[in-house]
Image: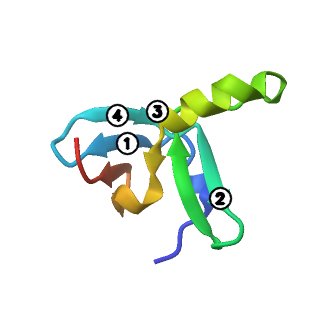
Amino acid sequence: MTISISELYGKKIISGTGHWIGEVGEVVIDIEGKQVSHLLLGKIDPSKAGDMIRSLFKNGVEYKRVKKVADTILVSGS
């Protein structure tokens, strides 16, 4: 199944235990690996990049944890 990156924006992320994690604000692409790396739970403001990007990654979800993408995104773990 193929999904476009734009379809991920705004989707709710739910843990495997049913807990709401957040909504997709940004999608990080690993250009060298040609794959999605992370789903971030907020938007990146380019004028405030440094600390904000680190914070978003800390609160983001590694895409390898994604188990299913439908109306919501189901990820492994809690």
Q: Earlier in the sequence, mark 1 or mark 3?
A: 1
Q: Which circle, 2 or 1, is nearer the viewer?
A: 2
Residue 29: image tag: 2
- Whole-angstrom CA distance, mark 3 to mark 4, is 9 Å
Kindly identify the amino acid type of the residue bearing the numbered disc 2.
Ile
Q: Earlier in the sequence, mark 2 or mark 4?
A: 4
Q: Which circle, 2 or 4, is nearer the viewer?
A: 2
Q: What residue would you read off at disc 1?
A: 13
Q: Earlier in the sequence, mark 2 or mark 3?
A: 2
- Whole-angstrom CA distance, mark 2 to mark 3, is 17 Å
Relative to residue 27, is residue 2 drawn left or right?
left
Q: Which circle, 3 or 4, is nearer the viewer?
A: 3
Query: What residue is rendered at 26% in x and 53% in y?
Result: 76
Residue 67, above or below 24: below
Q: Between 51 and 42, which is closer to the camera in this rendering?
A: 51
Give coordinates of residue 28: x percent, y percent: 63, 51
